[in-house]
Image: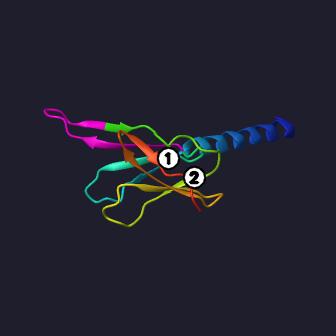
Amino acid sequence: MTRTAKAAGCAAALILAATAQAWAASYEFLAAPETDLNRVYRLDKATGEMGACQYGLSENTVGVTLCYPPGEGGGAQSQSEYALIASRHDREGGVFRVDVRTGTMSICYVLNQTVVCTPPGK
């Protein structure tokens, strides 16, 4: 194998590894800080799109997973780098969606079967 072929193979492997890392780190998950709420929020780290799921009881079964799609303000935002932060308030059911590039924040929570978020503020 020539040096050029080896270099091309190494470059392709590095690109595949970087792509795999990007795909592996597409979402962030965070439990709601409320101590008696079994809800977990999901964030698309590139678009800021929000979702949430929680456990629901169902008679004579193991239960169901109740999921809430994005609603007002919870859909995709401008392409950036987003993260989730929970307050330490034990009765807070929502979480903060933070754009780490711009420093803006929204509060996101479940309302009427969807995840809604306030307009971003700084």
Who's the residue at 80% across and 39% down the image?
A: 6
Determine whether label 2 and label 1 are within 8 Å by CB: yes
Residue 101, position as x, y percentages in the image: 65, 57
Provide the residue span drawn in magenta: 49-65
Query: Measured from the top left, where is residue 82 in percent x and y?
Result: 57, 52
Q: Is residue 39 above or below residue 67?
A: below
Residue 33 versus residue 91: which sits nearer the camera?
91
**Inter-mark Cα distance, 2 to 1:** 8 Å
Task: Quickly name the residue at label 2.
Answer: 82
Q: Is 1 on the left-hand or right-hand side of 17?
A: right
Kindly state the secondary structure of the residue where label 1 is placed: strand
Which secondary structure lies at badge 2? strand
Q: Nearer the viewer, residue 64 or 88?
A: 88
Give the x, y percent position of residue 41.
42, 48
Q: Is residue 96 left or right of residue 64?
A: right
- For label 1, the crowd category at 10 Å Cα-Cα, with few meaning under 14, some 14 to 19 and many 20 or more, is many
Q: Quadrant of the C terminus?
A: bottom right
Residue type at mark 1 is Leu
Residue carrying label 1: 43
Describe residue 92's horizontal placement relative to residue 104 as left or right. Answer: left
Residue 83 sits inside the magenta stretch: no
Q: Quadrant of residue 55?
A: top left
Could you classify mark 2 by the number of other residues whose Cα lies within 10 Å: few (under 14), some (14-19), or many (20 or more)? many
**Which residue extends farthest left?**
60
Q: Residue at x 67, y 39 (%)?
A: 16
In the image, is residue 57 part of the stretch drawn in magenta? yes
